[in-house]
Image (spheres, rainbow, N blue to C red):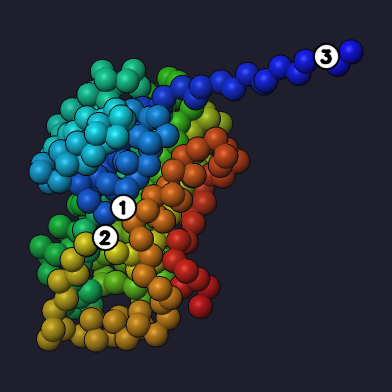
Amino acid sequence: MNTPVSEPDIATPTPRSVIVTGAASGIGRAAALAFAAGGDHVLAADLDAEGVEETVRRITAAGGTAVAAVGDLAEQRVVDAVVARAVAESGGVDVLVNNAGIMDRMSAAHETDDDEWNRVLRTDLTAPFLLTRAVLPHMLTAGAGSLVFTGSEAGLRGGAAGAAYTAAKHGITGLVKNLAVMYREQGIRANMIAPGPTATGMRVDTRRDAHGPSVITTLIGANTGRIGSADEQAAAIVWLASGAASFVNGAVLPVDDGWSAT
């Protein structure tokens, strides 16, 4: 007599609390949608109120759970409010996706004025640091957490953007590696994707009379592959934040059709 074989119990994953910045469009919106589709509770943050509300509408229309937070994440009071809301809504912060960023004008160093330098460093390096610093106490209390950053090819090389953006993204690369070492014993992982050219709508306001764009655009055009999609970048982010990547820490993952290999 054959003994019936019971179906294995499949545990329903516990929804995680996920903060995604730059979630009004592009890679951030795609990541927010992907996390929500997997059952996670998403706090979508952006300076663009209309865009981030649209992201939340798309998530909720698909049956997911999300809330919007609007503000400048380079301001400490905004960072504190975002983290407090995520904790109030979901009990903590399990995943932080530092995705928000702006491009420079591909200016060479001697063409980079104070405004361009400060604007790019403030958004692309200071804001991710502030938000990371704010979520870490909650992750330390939980004994687990995943930090995922959207870096850039400009964080790997010197010929993918102007002086300000390149410096900011190299800073993010260093921050990720430091976080990975500092917090691995506490169950917190830090990783970064380095996107190649991706269709996101990010505007590059190059200076036609400047030296930088004439050098950089030539280098970029000679080495890049196809244009990637925001969904392809988001898939890498979601994987890095998942249990499938539990032994991946301090990694810089190029998502670039082999550009970084050329």
Camera-side residue of 18 and 6:
6
Number of residues whose C-alpha sits closer than 10 Å to that of mark 2, classed few (under 14), some (14–19) or many (20 or more)? some
Q: Position of residue 15 (x, y in %)?
A: 41, 24
Q: Mark 2 or mark 3: which comes first in sequence?
A: 3
| Secondary structure at numbered mark 1 | helix
Disc number placed over residue 200 in the picture, else none: 2
Relative vertical location of residue 90 with respect to residue 256 in this rendering, above or below? above
What amino acid type is highlighted by mark number 3? Thr
What amino acid type is highlighted by mark number 1? Ile
Q: Is residue 247 visible?
A: yes
Question: Gap in Å between the C-alphas at discs 1 and 3?
Answer: 50 Å
Residue at image position (35%, 79%) is: 220
Camera-side residue of 23 and 72:
23
Q: Are marks 2 and 1 in contact (CB under 8 Å)?
A: yes
Reading the image, the residue beneath label 3 is 3
Residue at image position (46%, 40%) is: 241
Q: Is residue 128 visible?
A: no
Nearest-to-viewer mark from 1 and 3:
3
Disc number placed over residue 184 in the picture, else none: none
Relative vertical location of residue 185 with respect to residue 155 in this rendering, above or below? above
Number of residues whose C-alpha sits closer than 10 Å to that of mark 1, classed few (under 14), some (14–19) or many (20 or more)? many
| Secondary structure at numbered mark 2 | loop
Q: Mark 2 or mark 1: which comes first in sequence?
A: 1
Q: Position of residue 102 (x, y in %)?
A: 21, 58
Q: Is residue 231 left or right of residue 79?
A: right
Nearest-to-viewer mark from 2 and 3:
3
What amino acid type is highlighted by mark number 2? Thr
